Image (cartoon, coloured by chain):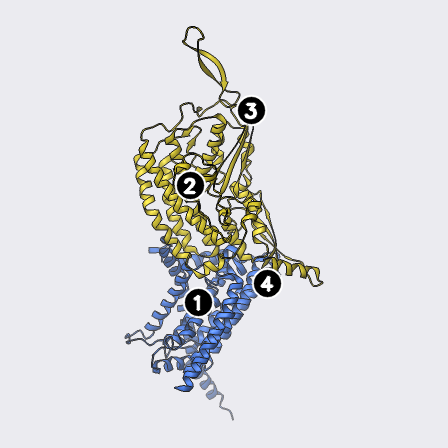
Amino acid sequence: MIDFLRLYDTANHFLLKYLGLSVFKSLVLVGITLLHVAYTTYAERKIIGHMQQRLGPNRVGPRGLLQPIADVLKLITKEDIIPSCVDSPVVFKLAPFISLVAGATSLAVIPIWEHFVVTNVNMALLVVLAMSSLSSFGVILAGWASNSRYSFLGGLRASAQVISYEIAMALALVGVMMLAGSMNLIEIVKAQIESPFKIYAIPQIIGFFVFMVAAIAETNRTPFDLPEAESELVAGYFVEYSGIRFALFYLAEYFGMIVMSMLAVVCFLGGWYGPFEVPGVPMFWFLLKLYFLIFFYIWVRATLPRYRYDQLMGLGWKVLIPLALLNIVITGLIKVLA
Amino acid sequence: MAQTLEIIQKQKDSEQWDEPYLVNMGPQHPATHGVLRLFLELDGETIVRCDPRIGYLHRGVEKLSEHRTYSQAMVLTDRLDYIASAANNVGYCLAVEKLMGLEVPRRAQIIRVIVCEMARIASHLLWLATHALDIGAMTVFLYCFRDREWLLDIFEEICGARLTVSYPRIGGVRLDFNQKIIDELYRFTEEFPHRIPEYETLIDVNRIWLKRTKGVGVISGEEAVNLGLTGPSLRGSGVRYDLRRARPYLIYDELDFEVAVEFEGDVYSRYRVRMKEMREANKIIRQCLDKLAECEGEPVIAEDAPDLVIPYGKIKRPEPALHPKRGYLVKGVEVPIVPEGEVYFAIEAPKGELGYYIVSDGTGHPWRVRIRAPSFVHISALPALSEGQMVADIIAVIGSVDIVLGECDR
């Protein structure tokens, strides 16, 4: 006879212990990341402002610190306009969510600290790659469903760009996988620390370079912000969006940026390990490296012009992919010879 | 470029030709510098046909001028190329002075050259700012605005207005320079040559910038002449034609400056020409400041310059004459201030050859004014420059020919 009570107890115990913890962790992670996203926009405006000899936001709150919150409030309270001529209202409404959900899901598998990862899966690297490709669906669908010339061009550009840079990025990560012998991100970090250089950014310098360039392209940021090229396509794929849906696209872009930076920290920069341990804040080094990479993104945006569509494709296929392949060959040789 | 068009033509002739993808760019668009509307036919990302439509900023400046006196009509010229209004004013005044046969005092001529060159620098700075922003380099934008602000402050000190200055008068200029302006201009000319390399380090050594501008929107010198391009857009194609040298006006023939020329004919060489021109303009201002010191205290407006308020109808001025026998002054025949006739005068405005054609019937207002605006001509060259290129290139091309719609639509 089945002991239902016991089964229930076990299930309850299981839920509390594992699932409950996961839900709690996810909430913490999403909360922290959302705050990070909000203040990344603030940091971006402030840093670029100072790079361009102006002040940046300084009206809302002390030193403009409440600006992101004011922005969010504004975008939430704005009217959510759906143009009467959109091709498919359902897809039009859905597209920003696809972008955001795909962007945010990757967070679940990225270890911020050895004991802080929502789900520790062995195929974590593949999950991140898959999710980042999925997020481009939102962009493509948005471009298509808007039924606008500019959106459509933006969507087309985005799909072509994401597909070509996906390959380069995956190939750049293959080198890491070969060195670490694992796709589990925690394993990768541990393998890095045990390796002679402590971080993979040194032996995998080509891979790191290719990954960073591809990550910028993947997240549609300058100099690869062609899908939303302001001067050509006005705003690209989200030109018809307004209010909260517009905000979701923005959020997705910043989520993408943060996820890609996290991945770079984990795969190339040694994760949460640093020269010394900071007591009480185990993820100190992780965050420091993350902030540095985000600053790098912002820095690039303030400095570089935008590529042209065909030049972007040329760079992806003729430079980055061969480089990544070369990197794999070299890594393989070293691995075999050593 | 020609090859791409050929391939597209072949596709058109074959069966599988889909109708082209039409994109209506503008009149409200962040990169069309005003209200330019471009009708683009695309094949993928390649432009098959580009059709500029103008007229969204038409205010009838030419027609309005016919109903104003000569002095009043000058205010309208501010609104042509509102980025370099001083140059427009000077051009108009020179045309009217040529009509009236007025001699402008030397000091006024020097001051006019200074404001013209200041307008040139301001215009080129704004051009560089927006051109770089269009290509995606947004930091240059604010750097340029910082320095342009300086110039606008000097303009404010000179005449009280920053953008639409209306500073010159027919027969001279409105006010003399005071010491503060001269000191500020000296400081500017000292500092500005160090600012130009700042922009250049941001974009000139940038591979992406070079990729976006080199070999884009190429036009040969001959073609450029045929299309009527003037100014930096023409000199970028290797034609050494600058009105300041070809038909010197004011005191340009006394000044030592080089005519900037580049030979590639692409967006990049037009960019280089304008960067060189900024340096030369700075040099010119510096020389003029030295010349200004030599004629300290001289008048800045001609004695026989017409009053600011001149009658609308036929105006005549009594010509004093000697009594034929007794030798004292008597009232002689009355001669009109503005003789009948027609006149064309062109100056080298920052955008190109800015010409004024004025027909006078002897009254206090022009019978007909026709403005030869460089932007208008340059827009007509856009299809030739952009067809067969990518969508992103047309943005670079629009930027490189430097158009202002206020001048084009008038």
Label ID, residue B119: 2
Residue placed furthest toward the right: B15
Question: Which amino acid does the dot numbered 4 rest on?
Answer: Trp
Q: Residues within 10 Å of mark 3 (few under 14, many from 20)?
A: some
The residue to which callout 1 is attached is A257
Question: Which amino acid does the dot numbered 1 rest on?
Answer: Met
Q: Is residue A35 visible?
A: no
Tell me the mark number nearer the camera, choosing from 3 and 4: 3
Question: Which amino acid does the dot numbered 3 rest on?
Answer: Asp
- Residue A315, how many percent across, how many down? 49, 67
Q: Is residue B114 left or right of residue B396?
A: left
Question: Which amino acid does the dot numbered 2 rest on?
Answer: Ala
Q: Secondary structure at mark 2?
A: helix
Are the residues flagged by discs 1 and 2 in contact, CB closer than 8 Å? no
Residue in the picture at 39% in, 59% down: A42
Q: Is residue B400 visible?
A: yes
Q: Is residue B33 left or right of residue B288?
A: right
The residue to which callout 3 is attached is B361
The chain displayed blue equals A
Badge 3 sits on which subunit? B
Residue in the picture at 34% in, 50% down: B194
Q: Is residue B55 left or right of residue B126?
A: right
Q: Residues within 10 Å of mark 1 (few under 14, many from 20)?
A: many
Name the quadrant of the N terminus of chain B. Answer: bottom right
